Amino acid sequence: MNWDKIEGNWNQVKGVIRKQWNRLTDDQLEAIAGRREKLVVALQECYGIAENLAEQLVASWEARSEHLFEGEHGTEHERRRKAVR
């Protein structure tokens, strides 16, 4: 997942993040500002979980949400899948 793209579109992405992790406050979302490592820390603090679990949660969310942040030509995985058809 391209976190530079997420950071650049953070105002739109915040809503997606909020739906996934509704305990995050507006202040936390502003502080995260599209930075993956800050999201992991905020999840640790907000949900009282270990870093490795927060990392796993973010990685799982990335895998499920990748389609939301595809570029004009889609992800590499999506391009390969379409080429096989």
Image (cartoon, grey):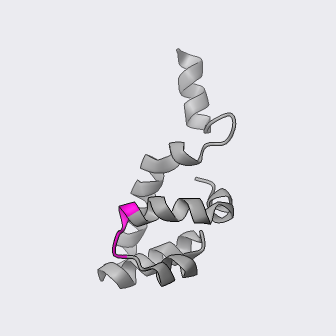
List x then y, in percent, for residue 83. 60, 19
Residue 70 image point, x, y percent: 61, 43
Q: Does the magenta stretch mainly form a helix, a strand or a loop?
A: loop
* Residue at image coords 47%, 62%: 15
- Expressed as whole percent of the image width and height from the top left, the position of residue 19 reads 38, 61
Query: Is residue 28 placed above or below 13 in the rendered structure?
Result: below
Range of residues picked out in magenta = 19-23
| Residue 35 occupies quadrant | bottom right
- At horizontal 45% and vertical 63% (from top left) the residue drawn is 17
In this picture, residue 78 sits left or right of residue 15:
right
| x, y percent for residue 71 | 67, 42
Above or below residue 1? Residue 39 is below
Does the stretch in magenta take in 2?
Answer: no
Up-down: is 58 above or below 39?
Answer: above
Residue shown at 54%/74% (left/top)?
37
Counting the numbered discs, the total is: 0
Q: Residue 21 colored magenta?
A: yes
- Residue located 60% across and 74% down the image: 33
- The outermost residue toward the left is 48
Residue 54 image-quadrant placement? bottom left
Q: Which is nearer the eye, 51 or 47?
A: 47
Residue 5 location, quadrant: bottom right
Q: Is residue 53 left or right of residue 65?
A: left
